[in-house]
Amino acid sequence: MSLLFLASSLMLVADPALLAGAQNDAVSAGEPLAPAASALMASPPVVPVPAASEPVVPAPPSAPPAPRDITVSGRKAQPKTDPMESVNVKTFAVVQKVDDKYIAPVANAYGRTVPSPIRSGIRHFLRNVTEPVTALNYFLQLNPDKAGKTLQRFLINSTIGIGGLGDVAKNKPFRLPYYRNGLANTLGFYGVGPGPYVYLPIIGPTTLRDLFGLTVDRFMVPVVVGRPFNTFYYGIPTNILKSLDERVETQAELQRMKDANDPYLTYRKTYLRARFAEIEALHGRYPAVEAPKPAQEAAPPVAPPPLAPAPPVFISVPVIQPLPAAR
């Protein structure tokens, strides 16, 4: 009997519903409740309460996932300066080999055998022929002062200088120096970009804008003046002599470029920087010296930085190796 009562008590403890049913049956039968059953029925459910030293902190609401940042840029990619680089590099390599094997020996022989006064006379004559073209481009660039001085040079050297063989205008009392100018500069003055860089045989380093301007400049005198400038027996010898003379005058600069770690890159950078400086000079923006900033405290006067040297000037004529002109 005791075992039966103990099993019934365990079942009631395991199932409160059975305990409630047993209670109802006992009450209806008029039997007293067992002490263990009474204690279980009278005890309230135990709810764990956190200790006073551990305050209840509500869990923060879960933050929504951050959206991915999307960056939109309206800036266009910069145009590539040298889109034909693979072809230009090959052309440059071939031209350098031809120059080392044929052009350089002939130019050196020309410089050794032809006296300097004769070479200077040829150079001055060929420059004097192009002075009207130079003056015209200064007029187009809204610079009548230099245009007038260029025309004065042309008249003085064509008469006193015996057809331009001597550069009399640059000396006293005239003091009219030679200025280099052309249609390519005029286009750059009005904002026409240089276009892609190219390296061509005979022409050398140039850009699409400079090549177009050079072509127009070269045909200006033959078309406007006519004979003898439009004949082969004038054009071929004069261009050969001009090329050899420029090759002799720029030998040191040419050798420096050839000795660089990357001669092709050196040629390209030097040419583009020089042409950019020439266009900037037309607007009076070269050389540019930054104005000193006002000092916060009293300080001893500092001497202004010296002016930057003028950039090399590339010759706008079709030569074997166009390089910065010697000053």
Image (spheres, rainbow, N blue to C red):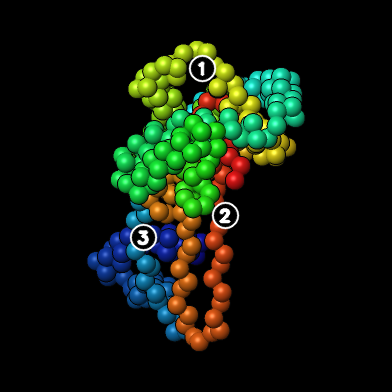
Residue that badge 1 annotates: 234
Residue 109: which disc? none
Residue that badge 3 annotates: 62
Categorize mark 2 by other alpha carbons within 10 Å: few (<14), some (14-19), many (20+). Answer: few
Q: Mark 2 and mark 3: span between their CA atoms?
A: 66 Å
Mark 1 or 2: the one toward you: 1
Tell me the residue at 45%/77% (across/down): 294
Q: Mark 1 and mark 2: span between their CA atoms?
A: 37 Å
Relative to 317, residue 301 above or below:
below
Relative to 158, residue 106 above or below:
above
Quarter of the view holding residue 62:
bottom left
Q: Amino acid at mark 1?
A: Tyr
| Helix, strand or loop at mark 1 | helix
Tell me the residue at 54%/16% (across/down): 236
Q: Amino acid at mark 2?
A: Pro
Q: Is residue 173 visible?
A: yes
Tell me the residue at 44%/31% (across/down): 130
Residue 59 appears at what percent x and percent y?
38, 68
| Helix, strand or loop at mark 2 | loop
Residue that badge 2 annotates: 309
Which one is in front, 4 or 155?
A: 155
Categorize mark 3 by other alpha carbons within 10 Å: few (<14), some (14-19), many (20+). Answer: few
Which one is in front, 160 or 231?
A: 160
Which one is in front, 239 or 62?
A: 239
Residue 191 appears at what percent x and percent y?
34, 41
Q: Amino acid at mark 3?
A: Ser
Q: Residue furthest left?
A: 28
Tell me the residue at 59%/46% (across/down): 327
Pick whichever of labels 2 and 3 is earlier in the sequence. 3
Which one is in front, 131 or 51?
A: 131
Residue 89 appears at what percent x and percent y?
60, 26
